[in-house]
Amino acid sequence: FAEVAREEYVAVGIRSALHPQVDLATEPRWSRLGNTWGEDANLTSELLVEYIKGFQGKELGPYSVTTVTKHFPGGGPMENGEDSHFTYGKNQTYPGDNFDYHLIPFKAAIAAGARQMMPYYSRPIGTEYDPVGFSFNKQIVTGLLREELGFQGIVVSDWGLITDTVIRGQDMPARAWGVESLTELERAARILDAGVDQFGGEQRVELIVQLVEQGNVTEERLDVSVRRLLREKFLLGLFDNPFVDPEAAARVVGNDYFARLGNDAQRRAYTLLTNRDEILPLKHVGAETKFYIEGFNATLLESRNFTVVPTPEEADYALLRLEAPYEPRPGGFEAAYHAGSLEYSAEEKARQAAIYAAVPTIVDVILDRPAAVPEAFLDVVFGIAFPEGKLPFDLPRSQQAVEDAREDVPFDTENPVFRFGHGLRDVNEIVIRERTAVGTRATSGQDPEDAPLQAGLGRSWLPAPTSTDLNRQ
């Protein structure tokens, strides 16, 4: 992925990427969990090292994309799973005294040559560090990141720490957690004093000029950050050749080979949790087979010469694509952050149970929010593709188990439904066995035991199997 994205980015002139997000998914309720690589620090570290290499190459140069590793010192342990974009989610907590666990991926990133780091909005509570937002926190940026861990690259703040703004029609105060009483000028000075080089999402040049004119910030301090930023641009070759070739960009971006890689990844990334009575892949299906579907367009099945019916009672099989549960939030921006309870409502559980009781059902749950194309789901259902994914986190058994767990500790919920690394491979063997029986080529193209771990799923919870098995006969 990283190498493909690098080629496409460079082709259109994008030379800095605001990723990877290497936060650890130790709090299942956190709305940004779907952008992580799971809750295991070692797996995340292994993946991010290859990610950085793919974008930057062996050394930063004219064909590289510099990466911003975020969110230092690890944004996963959010209090009650809320997010620090918002006032009610400003706190980051460590009830398990597990602060150092969340540093592991950042240490790996530094060793791999990470060029830039972004602290998160949150303020740490109950630690040795000042309870102020990480970009305002000199103990974190200078003391921990630069002096203790030895990072010499660029530190860019997260967006909107100084100025109130409006995002998608919603009023958003500056995320100046712990220093809300400071003026805009004082916030800018505090961020610079912490050791940050670049202000994310701000255009308040006049504040910096005023700080220098008043003698509160020296030109020598600014020169330190300017050197870091200019060095990055020189290494990327932006001053030597800042232009791109539009014709080359058209050939590179979205070319057939890259599209095939993406389509293959979609299919291989599916994670099979249960497969009762070897229902998958579906057998003996044809034009007369009737399907009840939810979550995708009927034309996808009809294009494969299958029949779609309006009710479960009329169907031979049901195919459901469901979102993981969440509590809708108000506001144009806030609503995009799926947060709150991880339990379906009683009404939704009853609705699903009625379908499972009426017809054999296959459920595809989007474990919150990575893109997944419905065509890929159908290819897995019908045995055209093999699900090779494994869970990058535990799937807790209940909302209560999540609430009882500690936000900063991995694998901390009691008796999870499925453990980290779970993912059935027997469906591969079933398909191979059946294809062999009819004389077709018996190979999946890769030994299932050598397949990579899937680390791009989302919200780490499903209801207990009694109400939401992947299939029920």
Image: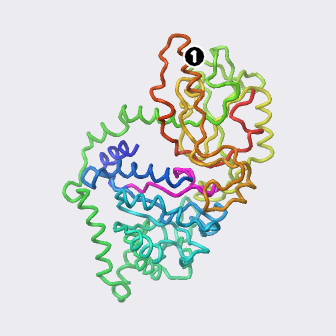
Is 300 inside the magenta-drawn segment? no
Residue pictured at 41% horizontal, 63% vertical: 117
Q: Residue furthest left?
A: 240
- Examine the image and state in which quarter residue 361 appears: top right
90 relative position to 148: left or right: right
Q: Residue beneath label 1, please?
A: 434
Please identify the quadrant where the C terminus is shown. top right
The crowd level at tag 1 (other Cα within 10 Å; few <14, some 14-19, many 20+) is few
292 relative position to 445: left or right: right
Closest to the observer: 50 or 313?
A: 50
Q: Position of residue 350 (x, y in %)?
A: 80, 40
In the image, is residue 458 above or below residue 358? below
Closest to the observer: 188 or 265?
A: 265
Main secondary structure found in the magenta portion: loop
In the image, is residue 469 above or below residue 358? below
463 relative position to 451: left or right: right
- Examine the image and state in which quarter residue 166 appears: bottom right
Residue pictured at 27% horizontal, 43% vertical: 246
Q: Position of residue 423 (x, y in %)?
A: 59, 37
Residue pictured at 40% horizontal, 77% vertical: 192
Please identify the quadrant where the N terminus is shown. top left
Closest to the observer: 252 or 406?
A: 406
Residue pictured at 55% horizontal, 77% vertical: 128
In the image, is residue 133 above or below residue 71? below
In the image, is residue 127 above or below residue 335? below
Q: Position of residue 5 (x, y in %)?
A: 37, 45
Tag 1 secondary structure: helix
At label 1, which amino acid type do we have? Glu
Stretch of the chain drawn in magenta: 17-38
